[in-house]
Image (cartoon, rainbow, N blue to C red):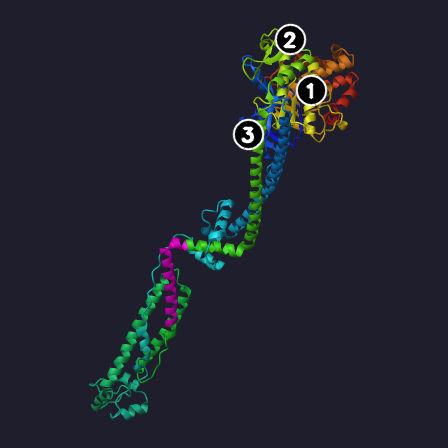
Amino acid sequence: MIQQISIADAASYSPTGEKLFDLAKINFVYGSNATGKTTISKVIADLGAYPKCEVTWKGGTALEVMVYNRDFVEKNFNPTNELKGIFTLGEKGKYILDNIDATKKKLDSITNSIATLKATLQGQNGNGGKIAELAELESEFEVKCWALKLKHDGELKGAFTGVRDTKRKFKAKLLEESSSNTSISGLLAALEKKAETVFGEAPQTELILTLPNSDDLLAYETNPILKKKVIGKFDVDIAAMIQKLGNSDWVKQGREFYDPEERVCPFCQQNTNASLEASLNEYFDEAFETDTAAIEKLYTDYKSDSERLQQSLQKLLDSPSKLLDSEKLQTRSDLLDSKIRINIQRIEEKRRESSKSIELDSLKNILEAIKTLLEAANTTIQEHNTMVLNLETERSELKGQVWRYLLDHEIKSDLATYKSKKTGLERAKANLEQQVKDETEDKRKKEQEIRTLEKDTTSIQPTIDGINALLKSFGFRGFALAKSERERFYKIQRPDGSDAKETLSEGERSFVTFLYFYHLLKGSESESGMTSDRVVVFDDPVSSLDSDILFIVSNLIKGLFDEVRNQSGTIKQVFVLTHNVYFHKEVSFNPKRSADRKLKDETFWTVRKVRQESKLQSHETNPIKTSYELLWSEVRNPERDNLAIQNALRRILENYFKILGNVDPDGICEHFEGKEKLICRSLFSWVNDGSHSSHDSLYVSIDHSMIDNYLSVFTQIFKKTGHIEHYKMMMGDSLLVESQGGTL
């Protein structure tokens, strides 16, 4: 059974489309000609020709569709062709008929079972069931995965390359990693730090730092000259005096100012004898000079070596490696500089006073600290350079570690729940799909079994007998259906045997057409298939029929309604589309319908054209009352068609004032004066024109302001003639809107 029909971008239906929804076993659609009824029947008959339209079947099982419309008539009643024979089950072979009936019941049971399984699998409308549950689970987990991407995309986006653009890709990658990733996750901070280098701009190799040589500088600290008291000989005659003074360094410095020729003592400015020079030279002998030279050399070497060391450290600080902790190096270098300055000061002091014993501050600890810092930097540089040389490998390893981190620390619980639920749903889905497959195969076998049985008991003769009986009972005696000379075909012939098809009147042709279709509903154009389940569409089946035949057609169709409601035949659903008010009222009449409310197994629809677009409307009651009521509904409708309202106004005025009110329309305008009288005359001229001409909305445009003027005068006609109460009654709630606008 069809549950919904969506019609878009077809004929006069807009691209956004209209829908017939919540369809029942019996569905009535009323609409004037050219409003879009036939498009509905064509979509049902041949959905493939309308790519933007949709037909939704219950349980996803499409039934055979049989449509009576102009296309059917033209296809089957072309004057140059004979009618195809209709095979129906004969009356012979009761055993075969019983077997067909029993097999058909089994087939129906299988079909119902398939529908139930499909409903569980995909829901009643194809948007539910286990498939929808699985889709919802996937969507929920996808959102959770995407939340991870958003959370870490800033620092770890390099690990997400290729899957950052869509939720679907990111989720698929995470699931792939969950089954194949063997990495060790590590700490998030470490991963983010490494990502800065690995996933940043392509890194370059770094130079290994040169470690300054400080061995010589450290060796100076143990030089014995530092502690040695460098003084003169003790057995010289002036030795006692120098010792008494206790300051040989002072004497040494004063010696430089002694001039042997002047012989003036540099200390007391007294004249001296020639022996003083000899005594001073003897006191400060060669050993003294050697030690003094050693002190001087220590000073020079220490200063030059320390400067060289400081310069090498400063060079590292001036162009520091990004992998070197330059702040620590600067601090330690400053401390080293301070110690070197102190040591140089102490050596300078030794130079001035060689008799003093001094000790240098050891540079060992600070130099070892600097060396350790530089060695650590070199280790990092080596790792970095190795990484640069193996960048792709490093990136691959880091990606694995990042995904492992997400799996172990971010989504572990959600992933386990997702996998558990998915396994259950996929198992249920696979089980249902297998059952549907098995049941579908059983259905195919039963259908084949029925076709085989049908071939043994089918004939085209019962259709001839049935149609001819109906023709005779309804007074059509001038022609009848007979077998054609061609096997499996019919012909329409006169009592004298001559061909009658080309000479049938339009009414006769329409009636035969309907009877042929009616019998086709119980049969098939082949020797099998007459017991298949069907959906039947009648699109204006009473054109050119008089009232008596129209009544018969409506009753034949209502008989099909009984079969559908009782489930006693192969027809499972019926659509009736018509523009004929009388036929609609006849075919839709049901004494069981309370207060004209629709029954549970039926729907009512109207289709109208608004601004050249077809619009569908569902109704809780039968929308078709009487012809007179329909005319007023056009006036009440705020989205009235400008051409339809023209004829509606004419017929209301004509029916009410001339027939019901016994008032001559020609005298109505006498109730108006001046401009209103001219408008009244124009109105009657206009409606009269509408009754005698056929306008095509594509080429005739009536201005909306023009319509408003005539509707206003239409209202005043009832008021001035004393029939305003009738106007109010027929307008109902719509009158409130008009009264607010000042019409009344």
Part of the protein shown in magenta: 367-395
Residue type (three-letter) at the residue carrying disc 1: Ser
Disc 1 versus disc 3: nearer the observer:
1
Q: Which residue position is annotated with label 2?
A: 478
Q: Label 1, secondary structure: give it.
A: helix
Residue type (three-letter) at the residue carrying disc 2: Gly
Picture quarter with the N terminus: top right
Q: Label 2, secondary structure: give it.
A: loop
The residue lying toward the viewer, choosing from 556 and 638, is: 556
Tell me if residue 194 is in the magenta stretch: no
Q: Position of residue 90 (x, y in %)?
A: 62, 21
The residue lying toward the viewer, choosing from 674 and 521, is: 521
Magenta span dominant secondary structure: helix
Disc 2 versus disc 1: nearer the observer:
2
Disc 3 versus disc 2: nearer the observer:
2
Q: Position of residue 396 (x, y in %)?
A: 42, 53
The answer to whether residue 196 is seen in the rendering is: yes
Task: Place residue 537 in its image quadrant.
Answer: top right
Q: Position of residue 391 (x, y in %)?
A: 38, 54
* Pointer 2 with pointer 1, Cβ within 8 A: no
Q: Which residue position is annotated with label 1?
A: 554
The answer to whether residue 543 is seen in the rendering is: no
Q: CA distance from mark 3 to mark 2?
A: 47 Å
